[in-house]
Image (spheres, rainbow, N blue to C red):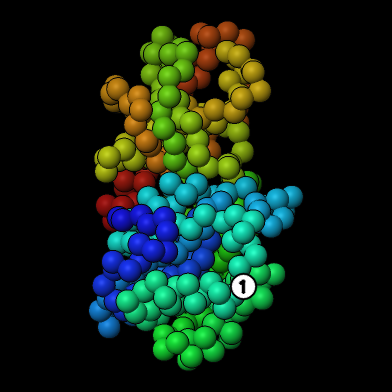
């Protein structure tokens, strides 16, 4: 996927350009509907689809005290968008100057940058521009004036609940992975680079990959059955999210992942870890021998979960 960082780069794209615009934290089913609308336009009319998003989250600038914990970093977001077949993503820096930009000025900039601008897809309740002055109705008026199409995508519901990043954050925070997965359309995951730890897991016979987690909203502390993706390869594993109270408690929350039946060097690799099921809460053990015995039981519990999943998938 090609990542653009400035509107001037849009001039080189084959028109008409179809935009899917939004923050897209989590890239949930509602976000996917907005993106699919732009992809559908391109399939019918040709041209190029561009997902337009912002970094950081606008509330970090507008109302930092209200800014949410992110479900995914920009890098993780780009990783997810690539999986949906998005070819171009424009990541615009959101600054205090950006916040002062009027709705008309923002759209005029898109119009002048594209050859030509053909379509903009947004969530129906989306607002934009200085003081959130712009909305989908104003956007439609601009579309009529400049000759591009606009679609305000209706809210996506599951039962009586509107799919939203806020509800997904709540589900993750409480460990309700089934609810998060229903709204995301995929298993909830985190992403991060493997960094060097104390290598105590290797000494205990259970080598672990220590992740520098990019995500901000995380599930409760504990031990989980997880699936791990690295370079397109999927592994089964066990992960501990917590403060490692048996070994040291320096107040730093860490994510350690053990890949079952694998012993490969992952230092420097970027892993995506999908949380499947809580095995137990984090706890402090009397000594390392007791910890080692419990890790062995955790691995066995995780094996049982993956065996059950395999049986379901085979039906």
Closest to the observer: 117 or 305?
117
Q: Is residue 23 left or right of residue 91?
A: right
Closest to the observer: 233 or 270?
270
The local secondary structure at tag 1 comes to loop
Q: Residue furthest bottom?
A: 144
Residue drawn at x 34%, y 51% is 312
Q: Is residue 144 left or right of residue 14?
A: right
Indicate the position of residue 114 as horizontal and vertical percent values.
36, 74
Name the quadrant containing residue 237.
top left
Residue drawn at x 51%, y 76% is 107
The residue under label 1 is 102
Closest to the observer: 217 or 278?
217
The N terminus - image quarter: bottom left
Name the quadrant containing residue 138.
bottom right
Residue 102 in view (yes/no): yes
**Position of 294 relative to 52 (above/below):** above
Residue 29 in view (yes/no): no
Closest to the observer: 64 or 187?
64
Residue drawn at x 47%, y 42% is 190
Q: Badge 1, how many Cα within 10 Å: few under 14, some, many 20+?
A: some
Indicate the position of residue 153 as horizontal and vertical percent values.
50, 78
**Position of 140 relative to 291 (above/below):** below
Q: Residue furthest right?
A: 65
The C terminus - image quarter: bottom left
Indicate the position of residue 214 as horizontal and vertical percent values.
50, 39
Indicate the position of residue 294 as horizontal and vertical percent values.
50, 19
Residue drawn at x 56%, y 56% is 94
Exactly how many numbered labels are in the figure?
1
**Position of 143 relative to 212 (above/below):** below
**Position of 243 relative to 40 (above/below):** above
């Amino acid at each position: 996927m090609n990542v653009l960082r400035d509107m001037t780069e849009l001039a080189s794209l084959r028109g008409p350009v179809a935009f899917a615009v939004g923050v897209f934290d989590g890239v949930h089913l509602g976000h996917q509907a907005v993106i699919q609308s732009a992809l559908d336009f391109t399939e019918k009319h040709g041209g190029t689809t561009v997902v337009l998003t912002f970094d950081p989250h606008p509330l970090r600038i507008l109302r930092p005290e209200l800014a949410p914990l992110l479900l995914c970093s920009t890098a993780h977001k780009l990783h997810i968008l690539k999986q949906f077949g998005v070819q171009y993503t424009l990541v615009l820096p959101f600054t205090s100057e950006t916040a002062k930009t009027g709705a008309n000025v923002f759209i005029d900039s898109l119009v002048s940058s594209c050859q030509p601008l053909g379509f903009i897809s947004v969530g129906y309740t989306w607002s934009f521009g200085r003081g959130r002055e712009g909305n989908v109705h104003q956007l439609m008026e601009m579309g009529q004036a400049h000759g591009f199409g606009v679609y305000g995508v209706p809210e996506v519901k599951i039962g009586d609940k509107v799919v939203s990043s806020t509800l997904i954050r709540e589900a993750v925070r409480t460990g309700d992975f089934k609810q998060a997965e229903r709204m995301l359309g995929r298993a909830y995951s985190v992403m991060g680079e493997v960094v060097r730890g104390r290598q105590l897991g290797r000494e205990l016979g259970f080598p672990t990959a220590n992740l520098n987690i990019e995500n901000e909203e995380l599930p409760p502390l504990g031990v989980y059955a997880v699936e791990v993706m690295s370079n397109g390869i999927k592994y089964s594993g066990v992960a501990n999210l917590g403060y490692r109270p048996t070994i040291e408690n320096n107040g730093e929350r860490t994510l350690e992942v053990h890949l079952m039946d694998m012993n490969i060097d992952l230092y420097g690799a970027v892993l995506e870890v999908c949380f499947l099921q809580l095995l137990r809460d984090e706890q402090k053990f009397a000594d390392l021998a007791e910890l080692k015995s419990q890790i062995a039981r955790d691995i066995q519990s995780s094996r049982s979960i993956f065996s059950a999943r395999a049986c379901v998938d085979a039906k």
